[in-house]
Image (cartoon, rainbow, N blue to C red):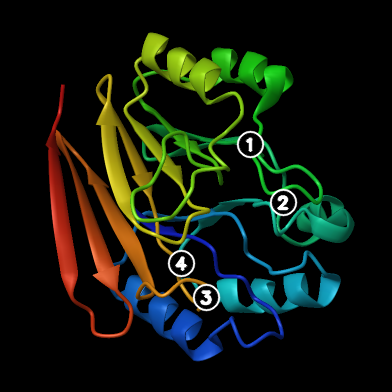
């Protein structure tokens, strides 16, 4: 299984969105020929219809199926309902090559902090297992070098416990704009950086996640194509 993981596009009219970087990143990931592309939220900057129309045109240049969940920016100004109109369901279960992708909506209207909630947790129990890949926007664990921590999921403990009990192996998230990977209780939790936003000083990037007997994560710099590779032994 080969997954391209992008996040935090922040498509909008402000100076912080770099359209040519977004296009370059998608052009680069298309060369990887992934089985699926995962987008972990903040597709837009303000959750506006014109932003959703713009980012939808951008995402339609992806050469394979893509799966996306909303972030806190997407939920602004009643953006959650607009997300469903242009992108799709905010909670979903999708099978791709024997893996079950479970998309969660951790966003809350006009709030930066994330929350999965009891309803989605109960739904997760029906679908998750060793072959599941969890997709959400907010991070379950703090990300280094991102300042004071304020936006870890408010129910992160409950979610982590559930993932551990059901032996989930991979979680993909965004939100912090800084790429990082943790491994806890045999769960690989990968945070993607921003694809095309200048809000943070880190270089724009995306990840390629390859799952076989091992889990290999390649962070690819959009600007110069340089890579950093992390490999986890399968258990």
| In the image: residue 206, left or right of residue 80 | left
From the image, tell me which residue sits under label 2. 88
In the rendered image, the residue lying farthest to the top is 165
Query: Which SS class for mark 2?
Result: loop
**Placement of 104 over or under 11, stated as above or below:** above
Position of the C terminus, as image quadrant, is top left
**Placement of 70 over or under 6, stated as above or below:** above
Reading the chain from its start, which is encountered first: label 3 or label 1?
A: 1
Query: Which SS class for mark 4?
Result: loop
Reading the chain from its start, which is encountered first: label 4 or label 2?
A: 2
Name the image quarter holding residue 155. top right
Residues at circles 2 and 1 in contact by the CB criterion of under 8 Å = yes
Residues at circles 3 and 2 in contact by the CB criterion of under 8 Å = no
- Mark 2, other Cα within 10 Å: few <14 / some 14–19 / many ≥20: some
From the image, tell me which residue sits under label 4. 194
* Closer mark to the observer between disc 3 and disc 1: 3
**Residue 92, which numbered label?**
1
| In the image: residue 55, left or right of residue 28 | right
Query: Which SS class for mark 3?
Result: loop
Residues at circles 3 and 4 in contact by the CB criterion of under 8 Å = yes
Name the image quarter holding residue 165. top left
From the image, tell me which residue sits under label 3. 197
Q: Residue at x 28, y 19 (%)?
A: 185
- Mark 4, other Cα within 10 Å: few <14 / some 14–19 / many ≥20: many
């Amino acid at each position: 299984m080969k997954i391209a993981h992008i996040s935090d596009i922040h498509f909008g009219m402000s100076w912080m969105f770099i359209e040519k970087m977004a296009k370059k990143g998608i052009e680069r990931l298309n060369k990887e020929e992934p089985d699926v592309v995962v987008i972990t939220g903040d597709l837009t900057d303000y959750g506006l219809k014109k932003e959703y129309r713009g980012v939808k045109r951008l995402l339609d240049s992806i050469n394979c199926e893509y799966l996306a969940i909303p972030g806190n920016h997407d939920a602004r100004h009643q953006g959650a309902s607009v997300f469903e109109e242009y992108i799709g369901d905010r909670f979903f279960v999708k099978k791709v090559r024997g893996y079950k992708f479970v998309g969660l909506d951790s966003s809350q209207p006009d709030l930066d902090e994330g929350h999965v909630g009891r309803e989605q947790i109960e739904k997760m129990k029906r679908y998750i297992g060793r072959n599941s890949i969890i997709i959400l926007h907010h991070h379950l664990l703090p990300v280094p070098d991102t300042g004071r921590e304020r936006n870890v999921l408010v129910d992160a403990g409950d979610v982590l416990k559930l993932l551990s009990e059901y032996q989930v192996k991979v979680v993909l998230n965004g939100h912090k704009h800084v790429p990082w990977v943790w491994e806890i209780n045999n769960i690989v939790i990968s945070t993607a950086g921003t694809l095309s936003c200048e809000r943070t000083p880190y270089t724009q990037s995306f990840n390629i996640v390859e799952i076989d007997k091992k889990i290999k994560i390649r962070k690819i710099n959009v600007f110069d194509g340089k890579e950093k590779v992390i490999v986890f032994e399968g258990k």
